[in-house]
Image (cartoon, helix red, strand yellow):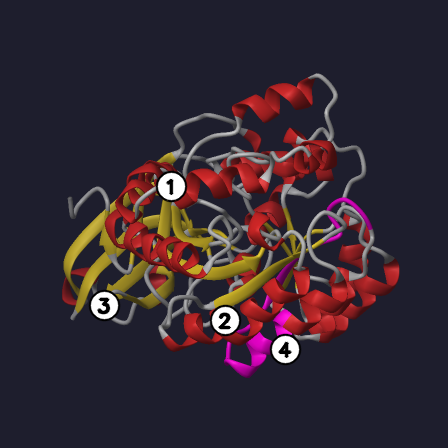
């Protein structure tokens, strides 16, 4: 028998855009999906199939949402920088004045692992209350061996305590730390020869990320980091083309990256390279909004090339203090021109692909993890249309319900 059979629901399976199975049922066994389809296709009477029947009153069920780009673990805040930005200061000006990433590095280095967990846990729980079951969390605010490891350990513990799957990315190549400001090459060597192999040996991350930008790392430096990641058996992803066209997305595609993220200055040749490589374009409308940018990612060109598009919060203390994936979906539609269906695909199927988790989650299919979001809406477009509304009825993570299994 199955453990649970959900009945009287509409299933947005996300196997393909816009597919909703009406009068559907979902069977759960051992934390995985054992059946999904029309109730009329059940192999026997419901009472003969499951230990527990749960009618959902016609609710919409989607895969659990996936926030595939966050910097959720950090200490301190940078509200003062936001205030400066409202008065005209640019990202580069703030960074070169000692603010930006390095300001958070100072606070994060001073914090204990428990401090980081205590600060990050409410953010993870807030995302979970909007139906999120998987969160990618990056390091990158330690920028030395002990503090980067501390961040990655904290990220794992945040997942355990908040009931979400955490996918960790080692982002040592986020910025050059102050102690290496006069010797960038030595820091890149430390990343490649010490830190990345150590992260891989300790199984502290599922991928390696880097920031390829004029205020961060050059393409040649990123290429060395990616080579070290591949040598250690870790896939890669990249912050690319946020502030300028530095060719980062093409480099990411050439290296078989899971994703290239931001992409406001993405070029046509880089789009073609991403399409050939199957690299996912992760759009981060929160950063675009908070930085008051005007150049949008080339969504129409990405569509035309068949590049998968994902959407994420980029939750971080400086450039995207956003802890709502539903708000990010709305922004992606309002600011970037995605359709509601594309936005939902961007936080389910395509987000899973951006993390290399497409065989585990992201769609409602037999055999996948029973990660589900149950919504109090009449159609999936409402998930992008509202901001700040209480839309979630229930959330299942690996078959366990927030409502029934508290």
Q: Residue 110 — which label?
A: 1
Highlighted magenta segment, given as a residue range? 225-244
Of callouts 2 and 3, which one flags the residue occurring earlier in the amino acid sequence? 3
Describe the element under mark 2 as helix, strand or loop: helix
Asked whether 41 or 93 is in front, the reply is: 93
Q: Where's residue 362, x and y in %?
A: 47, 60
Describe the element under mark 3 as helix, strand or loop: strand
Q: Which residue is mark 2?
A: 196
From the viewer's perspective, tell me whether residue 271 is left or right of residue 61: right
| Quadrant (top left/top right/bottom left/bottom right) for the N terminus | bottom left
Q: Where's residue 374, x and y in %?
A: 36, 44
The Cα–Cα distance between marks 2 and 4, rounded to whole angstroms, is 10 Å
Foreground mark, 2 or 3, reads: 2
Of callouts 3 and 1, which one flags the residue occurring earlier in the amino acid sequence? 3
Q: Which residue is mark 3?
A: 29
Of callouts 2 and 1, which one flags the residue occurring earlier in the amino acid sequence? 1
Foreground mark, 4 or 3, reads: 4
* Total tally of numbered discs in the picture: 4
Magenta span includes 226: yes
From the viewer's perspective, tell me whether residue 403 is left or right of residue 191: left
Please report contact status of discs 2 and 3: CB closer than 8 Å, yes or no: no
Query: Is residue 246 placed above or below 394 in the rendered structure?
Result: below
For the point 48% across and 69% down, which residue is it? Answer: 195
Foreground mark, 3 or 1, reads: 1
Describe the element under mark 1 as helix, strand or loop: helix
Describe the element under mark 4 as helix, strand or loop: helix
For the point 75% across and 33% down, which residue is it? Answer: 293
Q: Residue 227 — which label?
A: 4
The Cα–Cα distance between marks 2 and 1, rounded to whole angstroms, is 23 Å
The Cα–Cα distance between marks 4 and 3, rounded to whole angstroms, is 41 Å
């Amino acid at each position: 028998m199955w453990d649970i059979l959900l009945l009287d629901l509409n299933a947005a399976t996300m196997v393909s855009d816009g597919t909703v199975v009406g009068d559907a049922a979902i069977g759960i066994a051992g934390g995985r999906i054992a059946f999904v389809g029309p109730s009329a296709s059940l192999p026997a009477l419901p009472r003969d199939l499951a230990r527990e029947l749960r009618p959902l009153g016609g609710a919409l069920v989607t895969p659990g949402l996936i926030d595939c780009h966050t910097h959720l673990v950090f200490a301190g805040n940078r509200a003062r920088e936001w205030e400066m930005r409202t008065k005209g200061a640019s990202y580069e000006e703030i960074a070169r004045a000692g603010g930006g990433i390095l300001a958070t590095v100072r606070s994060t280095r001073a914090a204990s692992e428990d401090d980081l967990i205590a600060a990050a846990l409410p953010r993870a729980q807030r995302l979970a209350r909007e139906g999120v079951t998987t969160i990618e969390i990056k390091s990158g605010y330690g920028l030395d061996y002990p503090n980067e490891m501390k961040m990655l350990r904290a990220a794992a513990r945040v997942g355990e305590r908040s009931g979400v799957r955490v996918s960790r990315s080692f982002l040592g190549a986020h910025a050059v730390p102050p102690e290496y400001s006069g010797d960038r090459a030595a820091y890149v060597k430390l990343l490649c020869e010490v830190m990345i192999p150590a992260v891989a040996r300790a199984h502290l991350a599922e991928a390696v990320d880097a920031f390829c930008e004029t205020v961060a790392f050059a393409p040649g430096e990123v290429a060395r980091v990616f080579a070290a990641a591949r040598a250690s058996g870790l896939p890669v992803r990249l912050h690319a083309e946020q502030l300028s066209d530095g060719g980062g997305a093409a480099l990411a595609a050439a290296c078989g990256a899971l994703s290239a993220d931001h992409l406001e200055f993405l070029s046509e040749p880089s789009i073609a390279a991403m399409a050939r490589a199957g690299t996912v374009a992760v759009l981060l409308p929160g950063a675009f909004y908070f930085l008051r940018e005007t150049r949008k990612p080339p969504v129409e060109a990405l569509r035309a090339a068949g590049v998968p598009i994902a959407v994420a919060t980029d939750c971080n203390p400086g450039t995207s203090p956003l802890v709502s994936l539903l708000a990010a979906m709305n922004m992606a539609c309002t600011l970037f021109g995605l359709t509601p269906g594309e936005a939902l695909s961007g936080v389910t199927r395509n987000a899973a692909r951006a993390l290399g988790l497409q065989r585990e989650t992201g769609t409602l299919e037999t055999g996948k993890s029973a990660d589900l979001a149950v919504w109090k809406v009449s159609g999936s477009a409402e998930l992008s249309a509202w901001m700040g509304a209480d839309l979630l009825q229930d959330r299942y993570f690996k078959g366990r319900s927030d409502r029934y299994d508290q």
